[in-house]
Amino acid sequence: MTNPTLAADVVVIGGGAVGENAAGRTAAAGLKTILVEKGLVGGECSYWACMPSKALLRPGAALASARRVDGARQAVTGVLDRSAVLERRTRFTSGWQDSSQVDWVRDAGIELVRGTARLAGERLVEVTTDEGTTTVEARHAVVLATGSVPSVPPIDGLDSVPFWGTREATAAKDVPGSLLVVGGGVSGAELAQAFARLGSDVTLVARGALLSNYPEPAQRLVEAGLRADGVDVRLHTSTKAAAQDGDGIQLTLSSTNDGGAASSTVSAAKLLVATGRRPGLAGLGLEKVGLVPEGLRTDATGLVAGVAGGWLYAVGDAAGKALLTHQGKYQARAAGDAIAARASGTLPPEEEPAAWSKYTATADEAAVPSVVFTDPEVAMVGLTLGKAQERGLHASATELPIAVAGSSLHADGYDGWAQLVVDEERKVLLGATFAGPDVAELLHAATIAVVGEVPLDRLWHAVPSYPTICEVWLRLLEEYGL
């Protein structure tokens, strides 16, 4: 059955962290906002990605950190308590219950509609539930915040064997005796280490390099960390086929490490496929407004190109720019403010605001921060040297090991690496990368320097406290020549 049409100023499709931020902004501006979610409010990050994966990683990192300090090392005599780690993970997901998130939505003045949404025409959204279909009319804007879905590689036989995606891995009820991980990106590396430290015999297979989007010295440090935890890391190795092997899974591999193609097989109790994600736009009815899911383009306010009337927005993974929760939330805040300003007439619909305004997600192009929460960690913001040169910028890189008083105190035998990428014409930072134990907390200072385009001769006056790992900033600037 079809229910009567509802009306709102703004309809946000997708109740994950990104959709919540977009809806929160428009509701706070006084616009009647409906949030549509077919699953758990809070989305992937809260229940299957950011929070549970980091909860699985943290106990192992804490234990390893203690073992790197003489005096503490002698006090650590046990191993991780698997049950306690999994129970702590489950607490961070609220037991996969979304009541607290639903309470937040209500308290923010947002109306929640449970169901599957699709576009039905200009400013029209159909929401289907078990009871029927409701049509919602959006007076000002519809926001697509539908996240992303796993990209499954074309491996022969994969569709005939049971395998985990990242969702199943982060929600695991027990730790398998052995685990095959296909994928050398962030999720593959993090989960390989998490399960290795929980006691699994882990093999990681990557078609190319490990963490290929990060500088090579950082890749090598993470690879060494994985191998130290017993992970069998197989790089530049293709997975040709998957098959059932008794109660487990067998993969047929082809390695090009030696210049030729050498075949081998490897088996384990469980298989995790972590080969990336793509925008979750299928089934949204984009064809109803003249669009296709592939190649969706947005401006800096999130406004989708090619839609007459300027009412359709896409933010977060759905926009396909930077598939990171924090960046999606940033895009959502900018889009929400832009929608509110356009609704009130303070921002003309046809006008694109200036860069770095509250209505534009300018950092998407210049200052995206990311952290790989392996041990050692990798923290990066902005452009690598290669990316800067691809853009035609006159750039240089300054790099050195992280070997300062603060790192020596932090851990015995501390092994880290840092790099600054400099725009030689403007003498400002274009990017920075840090690799080593606990470097994630160095990243925001670099992000501020990149976003603020702080001149290097002024940045030199930002004196790092002694003795902290932050002293590497001074050493990098001195190495540069200041």
Image (cartoon, rainbow, N blue to C red):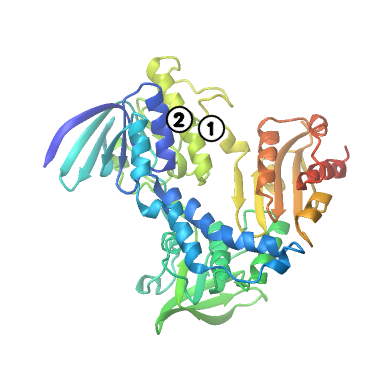
Three-letter residue code for mark 1: Ala
In the foreground, 456 or 177: 177
Quadrant, the C terminus: top right
Residue at x-position 19% and y-position 37%: 134
Quadrant, the N terminus: top left
Residue at x-position 68% and y-position 53%: 438
Residue lying farthest to the bottom in this orientation: 246
Q: Answer with left or right where residue 3 lies relative to residue 164.
A: left
Q: Mark 2 and 1 residues: CB-CB less than 8 Å, in contact?
A: yes
Compared to residue 418, the image places residue 122 above or below, namely above
Kindly report the distance in space between the C-alpha atoms of the residues bearing marks 2 and 1: 8 Å
For mark 1, what is the residue? Answer: 361
Task: Please tell me how crowded label 1 is: few (under 14), some (14-19), or many (20+) other residues with Cα within 10 Å.
Answer: many
Residue lying farthest to the top in this orientation: 345
Q: Which of the 4 quarters of the picture holds residue 69?
A: bottom right
In the foreground, 44 or 303: 44
Residue at x-position 38% and y-position 55%: 95
